[in-house]
Amino acid sequence: MRGKCVFYPIGWDDNGLPTERRVQNYYHVRCDPALPYDPGFSPPASNGGEQRPISRRNFTELCHRLTDLDEQAFEEVWRRLGLSVDWSTMYRTIDDSSRAISQRAFLRNLARGEAYLAEAPSLWDVTFQTAVAQAEVEDREVAGATHTIAFRRPGGEPVPVVTTRPELLPACVALVAHPGDERYAALTGTAVHSPLFGVEVPVLAHHLADPAKGTGIAMVCTFGDSNDVTWWRDLQLPARPVLGRDGRLLASPPAAITSRAGRVAYRQLAGDTAQAARKRIAAMLRASGDLLSGPDPVRHAVNFYEKGTQPLEIVTSRQWYIRNGAHDERLRAGLLARGEQLDWHPPHMRVRYENWVNGLAGDWLISRQRFFGVPIPVWYPLDGEGKPRYGAPILPADGALPVDPAADPPPGYTADQRGQPGGFAGDPDVMDTWATSSLSPQLAARWTLDGDLLDQLYPMDQRPQAHEIIRTWLFYTVLRGHTEAGVLPWRHAAISGWVLDPDRKKMSKSVGNVVTPMDSLRKYGSDAVRYWAAGGRLGADVTFDPAQLRVGRRLAIKILNASRFVLGLAPPEGDRGDHGEGGGGARPRDEGTGRRPAGVPGGVPRASTISEPLDVAMLERLAGVIGQCTRALDDYDHTGALMAAEEFFWFFCDDYLELVKGRAYGERGEGPGASARDALRLALAVILRLFAPFLPFVTAEVWSRWQDGSVHTAAWPVPEEVAPAPAASPAGEPPGTPSLAAASLAVASGAIAAIRGAKSGARVSMRAPVRTLVVTARQDHLDAVLAVLPDVQAAGRVEHTELRPGDQAEPAYQVTL
RNA sequence: GGGCGCAUAGCUCAGGGGUAGAGCACCCGCCUUACAAGCGGGAUGCCGGUGGUUCGAACCCACCUGCGCCCACCA
């Protein structure tokens, strides 16, 4: 509407665990990558029983099938909502182009040393059996229990240690106390023995040990939490893993458990889930006399994968990482500087970004041991014994992207060398979905695929998104822009809040309080839903409220009705017959050039033809409203813009329109009548455009009744359209003095309100006549009073009017029925 | 534990040193040739608390309380 071409793309993020899980539940299958592809496979129809194992390719085909269905449903909602995206730009994060772009970006990260493979402890979801990134972790308060267990000094004296994870006792590698903790000063440097397993572990000092927690001395295990990892690394301790990737205790004990009794004890735990092992070992400790107290129930926060159901474990595995500044001061400082360059709306959202960047604990883990995603585009050569040489990955040719290392052979190999000594192995993993989504500017602009489109568009203007994904979508996109192109990906970030349920709770699938928009769209209409949504300011959550939907629906209907009245009046002189209601007569309007003419739309009277004071006053007020709306939108305050337009519109309907109705019908002759009709049309042409971004359907409908082209590509209104005289106040008048027009408006509204009040108080119809209206006003208000008196008299059905001099600040009205 | 935000009518929210606002809900009316899916009128408040700055504070400052969120911790 402001004469610019907007690139407003749309894409579906279809990768990831939610899709896989939905496919498993929907089709009752699970993926087993060891199985061969079955071309004739069709998903089982039965609802009961176990999930049927199918090949990876069969599984991802089902993922495609289901996301197709889901995306059709989403598209229907977005289209119905009137989302003004350019559907021709639509991409999917799993399509060929996106996979090629995502893999290319990864390979460039790799070439620059930003991506690397490492074997290290990482967060592990035991249900999905995949590594996850720090950004996907959330903590949940769960029930646990503290156990105080006795380690033993050489002489047998107990050293009580408190733990909520006794099942990790066989994984214990040390005890730590704070270096300043005098209780343990003598013990530090000695060794103690673990109960049940009889493993000798050193007692060490580390500043992260908190004297206030438990007994002040902590068990270091492989690995119970991130502190354990820190201690393991800082104190150069051995690793004694006991938890498998399925979350169960490994079949064999760590080699450090050498005693027969220790190995027997471990055998009782082998194969248990962590939870089961916890109970069992507590009983074993109690039996052996090593449980000094507990289990005592506590509630404590535990880390979960955000889409998971079991607590995260920390497991050592080989994974791909992308450097994110966690271990690189310069990169971190660069990313913080990008955050400062970005214009945040609202500004305080920047803090969340800074908190996140400053709190990064490790590089970005991007490999996922999953199936439906963009494959990591590398293979590994196998040595003579068939072992992968991870240090020498084989990379695809750039022109071959996208590749699937699980199906395609690498350059220089044939398919039958897969898994053979001297042959190759494909990397089995896919990338974190954010590794692709973080390239959304590149995906939308078809980076490396479509000429220089990206160069024209990038950096972009704006990222609209909600606040909970600042640490993922926003941060990762900034990271990719920073490392790949050395730029901030966009100038502005418009950060929205959430839609809360009517009880102000966050909508959540597991809680079951999710309200999807389709019902509201059907019941109240798209404009009403948009009206309600537009009431949410950036950064603020909005509460789902059917009452507000009714208000929006009422507003849309009101626009329809008011427009019917205005357009039903005789069209302006010289326009008759050309643009009457339902006319739609073709008019040459720069069709074909692809550009809109600026200025007032066709068929709209010019402000200069409008002579009656009340009409001029209304338009003067509207000029101010145009300015208000424009400034608000420029300032990312869409709610302020809507409120300003709405407030004016109700004044326009309730006061102005009622005041001039009779005159518009011609009751006071042709000149004053034409002024009213012109003013009504002019105002309507502006009102429709001010509302167009919020209520696209009703405004487009009304616009189409008397205008060519779409209201959504009509020129955004400017104040000059309705107030052609640049100085509304006559020369010589001191600034700040209300114009005659403004004063007239105040008088007219005041007078009609007094008349309505009198009729309402008398409980009579608004059509009842007013016998006498007495206006008491100061001399300098008289001009304003006289200017609008005829309209007031007509609207109020006033039979006699008296003007009396007075000294009140504002004119006063006395109504006699 | 660190940080950010919020607190104004029964509800949802504007306002941002000078008389406290809107919509919804509520109450009372009105068939009024755009609209009864409508219109008009009305009542509704220690502006979270305590101090300070100021001639004057809902507004600025400090502290506090409550709520929400982000981050950290998780013995």
Image (cartoon, rainbow, N blue to C red):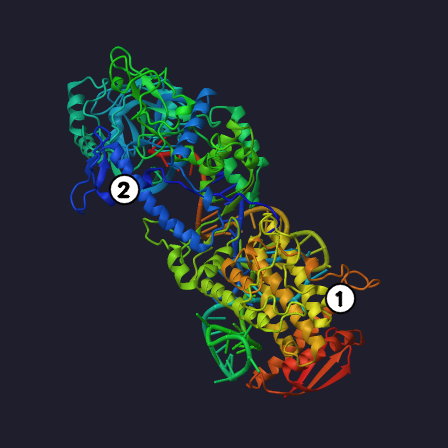
Q: Amino acid at mark 1?
A: Ser
Upstream in sequence: badge 1 or badge 2: 2
Does residue A636 appear left or right of residue A406 in this picture? Answer: right
The subunit carrying tag 1 is A
Q: Quadrant of residue A269?
A: top left
Instruction: Say if A150 sits above or below A590 in the image.
Output: above
Can residue A506 be seen? Answer: no
Front-most of residues A166 and A460: A460
Residue A811, which numbered label? none
Q: Quadrant of the C terminus of chain A?
A: bottom right
The lab-note entry on whether marks 1 and 2 share a chain reads: yes
The chain letter under disc 2 is A
Residue A697 location in percent, x, y? 49, 60
Q: Is residue A395 above or below residue A335?
A: above
Q: Nearer the viewer, residue A317 or A564?
A: A564
Q: Secondary structure at mark 1?
A: loop
In this picture, residue A781 sits left or right of residue A436: right
Q: Quadrant of residue A676?
A: bottom right
Residue A739 — which label?
Answer: 1
Residue A83's x, y, as percent? 47, 51
Residue A735 visible somewhere in the drawing: yes
Q: Residues within 10 Å of mark 1 (few under 14, many from 20)?
A: some
What residue sits right under mark 2 in the picture? A23
- Rendered residue at 55%/57% (across/down): A692
Q: Residue at x 52, y 67 (%)?
A: A560
Q: Is residue A273 above or below residue A640?
A: above
Closer to the camera in the image, A203 or A542? A542
Picture coordinates of residue A738, whole percent (x, y) = 75, 65
Q: Is residue A43 above or below residue A155?
A: below
